[in-house]
Amino acid sequence: MNQVISDKMKRNTILKGRFLMIYKEMVIFAIIATSIVVTGGYLYVSANQTASSQANQWQEDVHGAENKGKAGTTINISGDVHESFTNIEQLKDSSELIAEVEIEKSDSFPYKHVVFTLSEAKLLHVYKGEVQNDETIKILETGGYKDGTEYTFEGNKVFTEKETAIVFLEKYEGPIVDHAYVIKGGYQGKFVTDGHTGKPANGVQKGLQVKTMEELDLE
């Protein structure tokens, strides 16, 4: 009888230890996600929540994604960006580079428990900036693909190969990559196009919700 009780206590101790390890990992991820620099300003993921509540929410997101099974696994992170824009003119004024680009190559990778994507983009038409048409630049985004899971921020997907877009950019300064640009406002300065129509990012202000390239007024 005593042996049975002892075995149960050992199993409970092991389970508690595993739970604490998982919990600590989730808290560490939440803290890192709230402070990592990717947009020329800080990217805040649920910045108004405590680290523990962020960890719990992240855990729920992971379980929810896993439950999708064959439908595909996607984990979406919600939060706020340091810099926000309400109209196109604000984007224009604050951007170092404005251009229509075509994505030639796109690779995702982890950095300190956060997934990023670095894309090589050919400049089809430069509207603003000290670069020339047909040059290639690198664009860094938060999110991407890792181990069969897609990571998005506010429902916004990262670039894929052959995709074209109008982008409002600034030079990236930080430890993740060298000689790259980032999209203004995290995702707000990205408008996927087919040559005629423009699709704004999810979660942007009404003044950025354009439907055509003409509404961007770039010429």
Image (cartoon, rainbow, N blue to C red):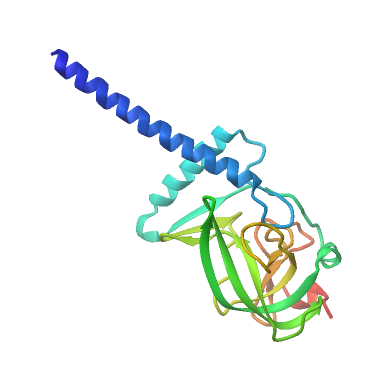
Viewed as shown, does residue 116 lie left or right of 214?
left
Q: Residue at x 72, y 60 (%)?
A: 173
Q: Quadrant of the C terminus?
A: bottom right
Q: Toward the viewer: 52 or 84?
A: 52
Quadrant where the N terminus sits is: top left
Expressed as whole percent of the image width and height from the top left, the position of residue 162 reads 56, 80
Farthest residue in the left direction?
A: 1
**Residue at 30% across, 29% down:** 14
Residue 158 visible (yes or no) = no
Place of residue 69 in the rendered image (x, y in percent of width and height, measured from the top left): 36, 55
Residue 43 visible, this orientation: yes
Task: In the rendered view, tell whether residue 21 sits above or below residue 116.
Answer: above
Q: Please, which residue is most extreme toward the top here?
A: 2
**Residue 37 percent across, percent down from the top left:** 67, 52
Find residue 111 and report its image quarter: bottom right
The quarter of the displayed image where residue 138 is located: bottom right
Residue at left offset 55%, top offset 72%: 106
The picture places residue 6, in percent across and down from the top left corner, at 21, 18
Q: Is residue 7 left or right of residue 159?
A: left
Q: Nearer the viewer, residue 158 or 172?
A: 172
Left or right relative to 62: residue 14: left
Q: What count of labels does the image hold?
A: 0
